[in-house]
């Protein structure tokens, strides 16, 4: 993730998709093992968290802590103000919302 963020800041990419982190909170809190879960006990072993020492020191292992830093790096790299970036991001996600509204898969 660190390499990707540096590449974003340098302008090597215009967009990057991170996926799969949404279940981490459930795994870490044991929610995935609840009785009403689709995961029978023993059928799912959480992967080890592969964070660097500095990430652990500042509690930057989960997407909720890291994504805002990525957004700030993107905003800085584009030279937008906070207000301009909020408008840009709102318009970007408005498009996603329109697609999902009309999709039977969402």
Image (cartoon, rainbow, N blue to C red):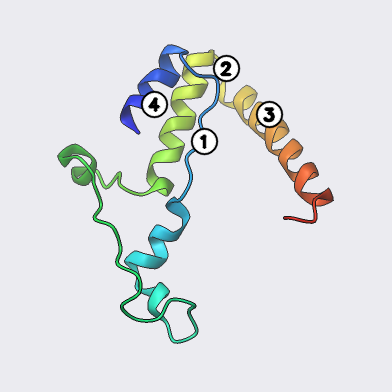
Which sits in the foreground, 25 or 46? 46
Q: Gap in Å between the C-alphas at discs 3 and 2?
A: 10 Å
- Residue 44 x/y as whole percent: 35, 70
Q: Secondary structure at mark 4?
A: helix
Tell me how far mark 1 sits from mark 4, CA to CA: 11 Å
Locate the N terminus and report the quarter of the image it occupies. Answer: top left
Task: Point out the frontmost of discs 2 and 4.
Answer: 4
Q: Which residue is mark 2?
A: 80
| Cα separation between marks 1 and 3 | 20 Å
In the rendered structure, are the residues bearing label 3 and label 2 in contact, judged by CB atoms less than 8 Å apart? Answer: no
Name above or below for residue 48 compared with residue 18: below
* Front of the two marks 3 and 4: 4
Q: What x and y, as percent, mark residue 103?
A: 80, 50
Q: Residue furthest left?
A: 53
Residue 81 position in % (x across, y down): 57, 20
Q: Which residue is mark 4?
A: 5
- Mark 1 lies on residue: 17
Q: Which mark is residue 87?
A: 3
User: Label 1: how many residues lie within 10 Å, few (<14), some (14-19) or many (20+)?
Assistant: few
CA neighbours of label 4 inside 10 A, class few (<14), some (14 to 19), many (20+):
some
Q: Secondary structure at mark 3?
A: helix
Q: Position of residue 14 (x, y in %)?
A: 55, 20
Indicate left or right for 95 with 32 as reference. Answer: right
Mark 1 or mark 3, which has the lower sequence index?
1
Q: Nearer the viewer, mark 1 or mark 3?
A: 1
User: Quarter of the image containing the C terminus?
Assistant: bottom right
């Amino acid at each position: 993730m660190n390499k990707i963020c540096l590449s974003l800041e340098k302008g090597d990419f215009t967009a990057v998709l991170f996926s799969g982190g949404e279940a981490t909170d459930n795994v870490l809190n044991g929610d995935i093992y609840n009785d009403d879960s689709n995961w029978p006990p023993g059928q799912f072993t959480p992967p080890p968290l592969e964070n660097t020492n500095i990430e652990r020191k500042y509690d930057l292992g989960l997407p909720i802590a890291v994504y805002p830093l990525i957004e700030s790096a993107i905003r800085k790299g584009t030279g937008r103000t906070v207000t301009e970036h909020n408008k840009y991001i709102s318009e970007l996600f408005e498009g996603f919302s329109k697609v999902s509204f009309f999709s039977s898969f969402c």
